[in-house]
Image (tube, rainbow, N blue to C red):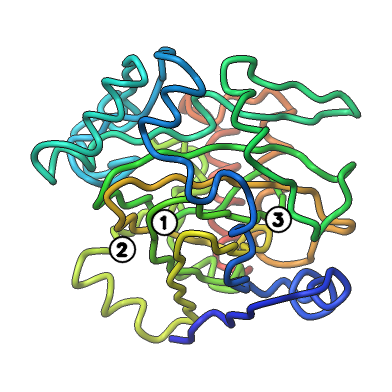
């Protein structure tokens, strides 16, 4: 296990040379402390800025999101919608175990998306942008997606890699998180859900990272850990596996994804390219068929590095 390197200041050239180009994570301490959001984003402030909008969000029977130990995929990927005030109340008040069962992330309601030169912003969440700044570590035209996250204490995000092929700067606004990361070279050890199986989340690990037996299994693989405080930025290179444990009473963060100049050549990049090609082909990889079985075998070979 190694600690992710932490720095207190970083120029863009040094960031690109030391971390982006070699695909290495880094924590930039205080990198977001000068934003207006820092010190402002409380539940009361956000309700005042946004109004009592309806907020779709993830719901779990445990603190794990998604909960792949649930009895069915419907339960694993369950969602709900609450007014913003009711959502904030649910994640900050009452029983600690219950607070961790709800999580808002940008795949329910993105903040910004940029595709093919066109920028789309969620009008209801747009006031949040006035409190943020785009980090100066990548060109504005490379921006892909911006998400906001809100959570209570104890939320665990399941071990996964982002399948959009983008680098990510995770800006912690309030609260704090611990993060564990694994490089793409550990793809086989991560045991991702295989194409053709019952679970469609192929970028997610089948391992419950909090299970003691899994901790023992992963003791010999390359592993990085980081503690993220309010105002910090965490750089997660494209296709690195990662999992967060949210430990603040009220946690908010914003993710900035951008496209690399050149995709890295590694096991996850190659495998994700294969998965994307299957989707583009229109082949149904979940219905039993000789084609499905062949695709599943090919995916297993890519995972195992054959």
* Separation of residues labelled 1 and 3 (CA atoms): 17 Å
Residue drawn at (43%, 60%), measured in percent from left and top? 191
Can you tell which mark lies on residue 159?
1
Residue drawn at (31%, 63%), measured in percent from left and top? 209
Residue 55 vertical placement versus 137 (above, below) = above
The picture places residue 155, in percent across and down from the top left corner, at 29, 49
- Residue 211: image quadrant is bottom left
Comparing 5 with 158, the one in front is 5
The picture places residue 184, in percent across and down from the top left corner, at 61, 67
* Earlier residue among tags 2 and 3: 3
Comparing 236 with 221, the one in front is 236
Which type of secondary structure does the marked residue at label 2 adopt?
loop
Which type of secondary structure does the marked residue at label 1 adopt?
loop
Which type of secondary structure does the marked residue at label 3 adopt?
strand
Comparing 171 with 157, the one in front is 171
* Separation of residues labelled 1 and 2 (CA atoms): 7 Å
Residue 124 vertical placement versus 21 (above, below) = above
The residue pinned by badge 3 equals: 167
Q: Quadrant of the N terminus?
A: bottom left
Q: Quadrant of the C terminus?
A: bottom right
Residue drawn at (67%, 47%), measured in percent from left and top? 256
Relative to 184, 229 lies left or right: left
Between marks 2 and 3 in the image, the one whose residue lies nearer the viewer: 3
CA neighbours of label 1 inside 10 A, class few (<14), some (14 to 19), many (20+): many
CA neighbours of label 2 inside 10 A, class few (<14), some (14 to 19), many (20+): some
Comparing 216 with 25, the one in front is 25
């Amino acid at each position: 296990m190694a600690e992710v390197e932490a720095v207190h200041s970083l120029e863009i050239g040094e960031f690109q040379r030391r971390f982006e180009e070699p695909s290495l994570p880094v924590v930039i301490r205080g990198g977001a402390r000068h934003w207006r959001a820092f010190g402002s984003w409380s539940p009361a402030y956000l309700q005042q800025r946004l109004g009592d909008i309806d907020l779709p969000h993830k719901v779990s029977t445990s603190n794990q999101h998604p909960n792949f130990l649930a009895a069915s995929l419907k339960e694993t990927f369950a969602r709900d919608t609450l007014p913003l005030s009711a959502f904030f109340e649910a994640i900050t008040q009452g029983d600690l175990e219950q607070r961790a069962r709800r999580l808002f992330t940008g795949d329910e309601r993105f903040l910004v998306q940029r595709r093919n030169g066109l920028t789309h912003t969620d009008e209801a969440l747009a006031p949040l942008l006035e409190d943020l700044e785009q980090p100066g570590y990548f060109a504005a035209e490379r921006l892909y997606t911006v998400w906001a996250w809100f959570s209570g204490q104890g939320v665990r995000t399941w071990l996964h890699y982002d399948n959009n092929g983008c680098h990510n700067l995770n800006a912690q606004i309030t609260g704090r998180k611990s993060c564990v990361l694994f490089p793409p070279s550990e793809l086989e050890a991560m045991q991702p859900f295989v194409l053709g199986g019952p679970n469609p989340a192929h970028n997610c690990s089948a391992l419950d990272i909090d299970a003691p037996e899994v901790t023992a299994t992963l003791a010999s693989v390359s592993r990085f850990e980081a503690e993220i405080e309010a105002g910090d930025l965490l750089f997660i290179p494209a296709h690195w596996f990662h999992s967060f444990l949210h430990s603040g009473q009220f946690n908010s963060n914003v993710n900035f994804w951008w496209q690399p100049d050149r995709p890295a050549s590694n096991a996850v990049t190659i495998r994700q390219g294969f998965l994307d090609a299957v989707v583009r082909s229109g082949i149904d990889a979940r219905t039993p068929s000789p084609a499905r079985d062949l695709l599943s075998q090919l995916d297993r070979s890519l995972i195992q590095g054959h």
